[in-house]
Image (cartoon, helix red, strand yellow):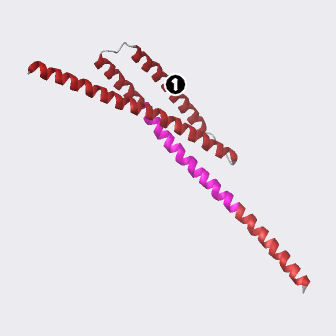
C-alpha cells in the first residue's frame, strides 16, 4: 500500500511539474505578445506625435513672432531668448526623431524588448513635454494679443467719444 502511495505521489509530482512548465511557457508567450502590442501602440503614437510636433513648433514660432511684432518688441532680448529656446527645442525634436527612427527599425526580443519599450516611453514623454510648452506659448500669445486688441479698441473709443 505504501508503495502505491509513493508511486501515485511521484506521478502527481511529475504531472504538477509538467503543468507548471507548460503554464510558464504560456505566460512567457502572453507577456511577449503584450510587449509586442505595447511596442506597436507606442510606435504609432510617437510617430503621430512627432509628425504633429513639427507643425505645432511652426505655429508656436509664428504666434510668438506676431505677438512680439504687435507689441513692438520684435528685436528685443525676449525675442532673442525665444529664438534661442526655440532652436534648442527644434534640435531636441530632431534628436528625438532620429532616435525614434533608429528604435523603430531595430528588431529585438526578450529583455531587449522591455528596454526598447522604456526608451520609447521616454521619447513619448519628451515629445509631450515639448508639445505642452508650445501649446502653452500659443495660449499666452493669444491672451497677450487679445489684451493688445482690447487696449487699442478702448483707446479708439476714447478718442472717438
> Residue 110 at what x, y percent from top left?
69, 49
Does 44 appear in magenta?
yes
Q: Quadrant of the N terminus?
A: bottom right
Q: Is residue 16 above or below residue 148?
A: below
Q: Residues within 10 Å of mark 1 (few under 14, many from 20)?
A: few
Residue situated in front as seen by the camera: 146 or 99: 146
Residue situated in front as seen by the camera: 79 or 55: 79
Residue situated in front as seen by the camera: 154 or 15: 154
> Residue 124 at what x, y percent from top left?
53, 39
Q: Secondary structure at mark 1?
A: helix
Q: Residue at x 64, y 55 (%)?
A: 31
**Label 1 belongs to which residue?**
91
Would residue 62 appear left or right of 147 to someone viewing this image? right
> Residue 52 at what x, y percent from top left?
43, 36
Would residue 32 appear left or right of 16 to someone viewing this image? left
- Stretch in magenta: 25-54
> Residue 33 at what x, y percent from top left?
61, 55
Q: Residue at x 74, y 69 (%)?
A: 19
Q: Residue at x 30, y 26 (%)?
A: 144
Find residue 82 and report its image quarter.
top left
Find residue 106 and report its image quarter.
top right
Q: Can residue 110 be seen in this snapshot?
A: yes
Amino acid at each position: 500500500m505504501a508503495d502505491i502511495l509513493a508511486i501515485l505521489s511521484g506521478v502527481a509530482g511529475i504531472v504538477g511539474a509538467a503543468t507548471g512548465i507548460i503554464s510558464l511557457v504560456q505566460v512567457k508567450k502572453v507577456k511577449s505578445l503584450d510587449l509586442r502590442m505595447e511596442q506597436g501602440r507606442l510606435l504609432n503614437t510617437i510617430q503621430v506625435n512627432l509628425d504633429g510636433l513639427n507643425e505645432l513648433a511652426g505655429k508656436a514660432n509664428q504666434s510668438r513672432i506676431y505677438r512680439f511684432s504687435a507689441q513692438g518688441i520684435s528685436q528685443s532680448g525676449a525675442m532673442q531668448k525665444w529664438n534661442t529656446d526655440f532652436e534648442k527645442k527644434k534640435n531636441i525634436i530632431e534628436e528625438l526623431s532620429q532616435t525614434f527612427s533608429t528604435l523603430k527599425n531595430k528588431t529585438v526580443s526578450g529583455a531587449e524588448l522591455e528596454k526598447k519599450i522604456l526608451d520609447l516611453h521616454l521619447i513619448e514623454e519628451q515629445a509631450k513635454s515639448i508639445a505642452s510648452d508650445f501649446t502653452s506659448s500659443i495660449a499666452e500669445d493669444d491672451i497677450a494679443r487679445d489684451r493688445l486688441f482690447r487696449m487699442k479698441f478702448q483707446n479708439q473709443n476714447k478718442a472717438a467719444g
